[in-house]
Image (cartoon, helix red, strand yellow):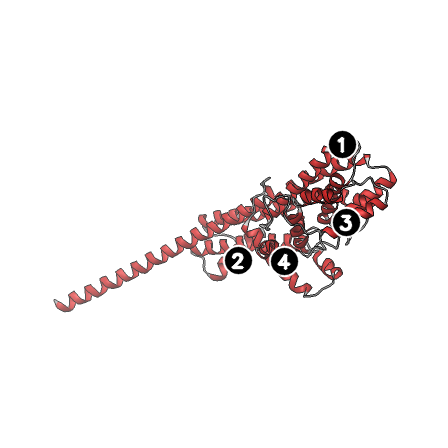
Amino acid sequence: MAPHYRQRRAVRSRLLFHLDVEWLLLAVRLLVLAGAALAVLATVGSAIQTVILPRAVPSRLTRWVFQFMRRVYNLRIGRGATYERRDRIMASYGPVSLLALLLTWILIVMGAFQAIYWALGHEGLRAFQLSGSAVVTLGFAAPDDVPTTIAVISEAVIGLVLLALLISYLPTLYGAFQRRENLVTKLEIRAGSPPSGIEMLERLHRLSGLQILSEEIWRQWEDWFVDISESHTSLPALNFFRSPEPQRSWVTAAGAVLDGASLYISTLEIEGGHDRHADLCIRAGYLALRQVCAFFRLAYATNPQRDDPISIAYEEYLAAYDRMRDAGLPVKADRDQAWRDFAGWRVNYDDPLLALAQLVSAPYAPWSSDRGALRRPSLLRGLLAR
């Protein structure tokens, strides 16, 4: 009896062992299935946040892809590169990063469904064939059971949707790009290249008088800033689409207009008193720049005070004051008060302007991209956190 008992006991132990292995394998397959499903949902969620959602909700996956591509481009540019080389290389950064984002979406979906097919019992090369066939909708690997068929159809639909989303995203992106560049190009006529707020005031005073500022310029740029605050946060890739001409940039254009409005209010004697349209233009401008900075997690003073330091030196302002006076503009008599008023306006957009100029590698322009943002500790923290 003892040998038979030991034999039955050994058989029972083997059966229990096999059952434990099967249960363990089933648990692993279920965990892989759940993890893969979460990866697919996260990818679809990233696509929705990036392309569909009309709100400034950053996607971690999109941010990681753009950060990775920025590091690749920085390695290609190298240290100490001239602006011409940087601009030439960075011109493709935005479009290429978008394509890299689409490829990342597809690869994650493909890898996740390959894990799903493995969880459904398809091993190795067969799982890869099923996933590759479905995601590119070629159909060269046919499923052989109902669960696999459902998974293949789901993967094919998701792949098509991701591709269609990006294709539909491009007309919206380029429409916003065209709206942005129209005024940037027009500013070169009025403010020179690189654009300068001082030169804008001088040219308009010489050609048509300053009345056009209140009647047309400030209102146009207020609308432009409102559009920037919406388009450059809901379409974040748009920030890195560079202007057709190397010496133009939406950031330096914004800085020139804001400086022009600040000088206009603080330094010039305005006919009829204070110009509320210039006030509104400046407010729309610094709110827009702050919103873009907040989206990219760039550091800036959220509640600046009038006497906070700015990147413009007192001597630089005095040189601008003398230049406008010599050009015949109606400057105010009290230069010190005019300086305090100018600094009180400039402090609202000083940090965001310099941070964004660094973010997009803006071309040289006075009082914006020439300020050396990386020498300022508050901006350094934000730029390194990208």
Q: Position of residue 316 (x, y in %)?
A: 75, 52
Q: Secondary structure at mark 3?
A: helix
- Image check: 304 left or right of 120? right
**Mark 2–mark 1 distance (CA, rounded to whole Å):** 74 Å
Q: Residues within 10 Å of mark 1 (few under 14, many from 20)?
A: few
Is disc 1 placed on a helix, strand or loop? loop
Label 2 SS: helix
Q: CA distance from mark 1 to mark 3?
A: 23 Å
Q: Residue at 19% of width from left, 64% of height from top?
A: 9
Q: Which residue bears the numbered disc 1?
A: 273
- Residue 156 position in % (x across, y down): 55, 48
Residue drawn at x 63%, y 46% as measured from the top left? 292
User: Which amino acid does the dot numbered 4 rest on?
Assistant: Arg
Relative placement, left or right, of 217 versus 167 is right
Q: Nearer the viewer, residue 131 or 210?
A: 210
Mark 4 sits on what residue?
70
Q: Residues within 10 Å of mark 3 (few under 14, many from 20)?
A: some
> Residue under circle 2?
129
Give the number of the mark in front: 2 or 1.
1
